[in-house]
Amino acid sequence: MMKITDTVKHLLIINVVVFIGRMTLGGGELFMQWFALYFPENPLFQPWQIFTHMFMHADVMHIFFNMFALWMFGTAVEHQLGSKKFLFIYISAGLGAVFFQLGYHYFEYLPLKQALLDGGVSNSYIIETLSEGKVFTAVGDKLTEVFFLPMVGASGCIMGVLAAFGMMNPEAKLMLIFLPIPIKAKYFIPGIIILDIISALTDQSFFSPSNTAYMAHVGGAITGFLIMWYWKKTQFNKNRWDR
């Protein structure tokens, strides 16, 4: 078994400490209001949440599976790339996840907001409903709720690490816990991304809870892929791969 690397170990500790704080302080809501990533139109949004949400998790199963994946794939990637490049991919993938997920939310939200404004709904009413974590939109002659839940979790970061692992180890065989069929990384990882895209567009969940930020997964994976693609493309100078 590969020995856990320093950066992965520190990330595991930070995530666990934050999770304990999230579950014990302020009735479980204080950390959510401060550090989860809220939709930018929501009055609870703060700029630092773009970074801090990567270390927040919703429940025990959420943090367990994310940290298990971080240990399994992050250790291998850090061994191969070194700590600086690994951490760069990890954080960059988290930011890429934010960009994709918020971009997708705005794609949904802006037309709805304009339709409401055109229908005579005040902007202050829209902001008020957003502060409750939702926005109202018209469907026919009725109002329905569309929720923009706070975004938490390291999944986007880990998807970037997984993409990096797959590019460096395309022949490695991977399995889902509940689907124990070995599949080569070069097929497994694109397959997971495709399922996430389908889930985002159809609201059909395959292997994740229905409230998963699917486009965050896609954004993290694409970011990790692009970083690795660029590094591999420019590795004519071997110093680029020095640790």
Image (cartoon, rainbow, N blue to C red):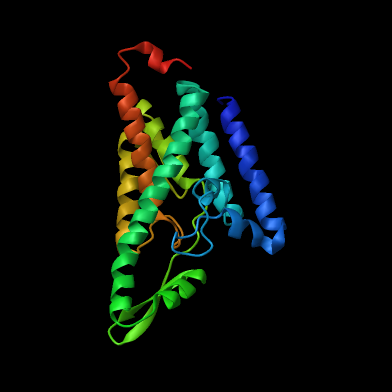
Specify whether 148 is left or right of 235: right
State the image coordinates of residue 186 (x, y, percent, origin top left): 31, 34
Residue 195 position, x and y percent, is 32, 52
Quick one: 48 or 35, which is closer to the camera? 48
Up the image or down, 156 lies above or below 38; here it is above
Q: Position of residue 49 (x, y in %)?
A: 53, 51
Residue 170 as seen in the image, left or right of residue 87: left
Q: Where residue 167 sits: x, y (%)? A: 34, 29
Q: Is residue 77 visible?
A: no
**Can see residue 213?**
yes
Note whether 65 is above or below 76 in the view shown: below
Residue nearest the viewer, comparing 167 with 154? 154
Left or right of 53 on screen, residue 179: left
Question: What residue is rendered at 43% in x and 37% in y?
Answer: 92
Q: Nearer the viewer, residue 97 or 46?
A: 46
Residue drawn at point x = 35 percent, y = 63 percent: 204
Residue 165 in the image: above or below residue 33: above
Occupied quadrant, residue 127? bottom left
User: Which quarter shows the N terminus?
Assistant: top right
The residue shown at (60%, 56%) is 34
